[in-house]
Amino acid sequence: MRVTGLGHAGLFIETAAGSVLCDPWANPAFFGSWFPFPDNTDLDWAHYGRAADYLYVSHLHRDHFDAENLRRSVRKNVTVLLPAFATDELERALSALGFTNFLRVPSGTPVERDGLRIMITALTGPGDGPIGDSALSLDDGRTVLLNQNDAHPLDIAAIREFGEVDAYFVQFSGAIWYPMVYQLPLSAKKEFAARKRQGQFDRALRYIDAVEAKHVFPNAGPPCFLDDELFEHNGTGQDGESIFVDQLEFLRQLGRARPRVTAHLLLPGTVAEPEGTACKLTHRYTETEIEHIFGEKPAYLREFARRQQPALAAERASRSPALPRERLLAELKQWWEPLLTRADRICAGVGGPARLDVGEVPIVIDFPAREVRLWDGERCRYTLSTSADLVATNIERREVDWSNSLLLSMRFTASRIGPYNEFLYVFFKCLSMERIEYVENYYDSCQDDGQDIVLDGWRVQRRCPHLRADLGRFGQIEGEVLTCTLHGWRYDLTTGRCLTADGHDIRASAVS
């Protein structure tokens, strides 16, 4: 097996039984905010697109689903490996680009094609990407590969039944806007960012320990930010207030925490050839160039930014002009109020009005009243503020997932009173009746199954209320606080109250 890194989560996997192109992202994403780090634009994308026997796009987030690169570079009769998502949005998006040959892979079920065993583990919860994420397992008869990209949590025991993993590609860096966009004192932002970075590392470490692969490759990140407005978010920020750990930083931390784990630096154009306990690694960069990329990162990023100015200018020119206040309100009312009417669990979960400042126009999404209206001065626990042209563009394009356009762009500011509210962000992911129906039915079907476990003197429900991770594997108790280490959600065991977000209390009692 021969694996070429393509940047971010992109891989080109060559085997004697066929080749697989994974998540080929090269163009700026999320309103021109995200770029792959390091630069991968000079790779021979047409070669990979022609040579691939299979195309695998893990999910619809635009740092994985690059419509322009897919349209321009990948032959349209390639066999698309399609995860078993609950909606067919990924298939529709790929069909719109001209792809016609789909292999629908049942979740968690190995499929054999011409000597290549393939398994896709599909995740379908509201917190999984834009209503879906997935991981890919491959076995060519000599080497087993697991490409996890952004997918978590996963049933690793079930994945290991597919085969003991030789090459493991694991997400390691941040892929969220928290805490950078929040209006917080710098000291608080630094503290929250440090916790987030540690949480990211702990999650990756849990997976590495569970998978027990012969070779580990940090993958699926980080992004970089080349617009002057966002440049301060690169890496860990000017004063540690950002979350985007790079590949070498992760490898150093992993080396200290798990010195016996064999891990490798994967960059755009790096070729890895794992064979048992050995792995031949060939970089296209010299050691001097690698030192410049990571050791002189601000200078490298400024050079990258200069090359990308035409792309940034084109993205800005593609935005729609701001809408007049009356039309803006009318458009959002017509679009969102029917969705709110159906969104019983989301509205109950948010539990109050949320404010959306669109340029100079303050709008309220009144979840209890199921209406969209102008702000009337009332107290709102959640406030998001962004520019009017971005909202106008989302309206014109009928973007059904504002997480996948606006929020991940980090071109907004946020404030809140109290803990994180998952339901508010789920609403912004589900701006179509198809998605609202799916999520509401998902919440209805995922009630606590009644199973309990005993953990360090406490009887608690087995499944984390957040994304139903197994607390027997991921639960950690310190004093009277339970932490689900998969995502860092915390619970007060004496009351069952979720300390991380509203509406996710847990069943817990002390064992006498």
Image (tube, grey):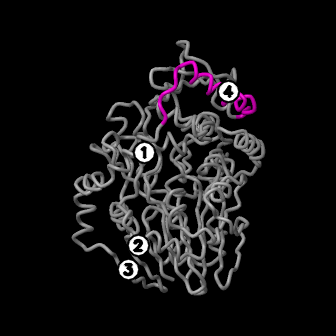
Nearest to the eye among marks 3 and 1: give it: 1
Residue 404 place in picture, x, y as percent: 54, 45
Q: Earlier in the sequence, mark 2 or mark 3?
A: 2
Horizontal side of 295 relative to 50 (left or right) equals left
Q: Circle 3 is placed at which residue position? A: 281
Q: Circle 1 is placed at which residue position? A: 315
Residue 286 place in picture, x, y as percent: 26, 74
Q: CA distance from mark 4 to mark 2?
A: 52 Å
Q: Earlier in the sequence, mark 2 or mark 1?
A: 2
Q: Amino acid at mark 1?
A: Glu
For mark 4, give the secondary structure.
helix
Q: Circle 2 is placed at which residue position? A: 263
Q: Tags 2 and 1 in contact by the CB under 8 Å rule?
A: no
| Rendered position, 352 above or below 153 | above
| Rendered position, 211 above or below 330 | below
| Rendered position, 440 above or below 257 | above
Q: Residue at horizontal 69%, vertical 48%?
A: 461
Q: Amino acid at mark 2?
A: Ala
Is 492 or 447 nearer to us in this picture? 447
Residue 109 place in picture, x, y as percent: 72, 70
Q: Residue at horizontal 64%, vertical 26%?
A: 351
Residues drawn in magenta: 320-345
Q: Earlier in the sequence, mark 4 or mark 1?
A: 1
Q: Main secondary structure of the magenta part?
A: helix
Q: Amino acid at mark 4?
A: Gln
For mark 3, give the secondary structure.
strand
For mark 2, give the secondary structure.
loop
Nearest to the eye among marks 2 and 1: give it: 1
Is 83 or 244 nearer to us in this picture? 83
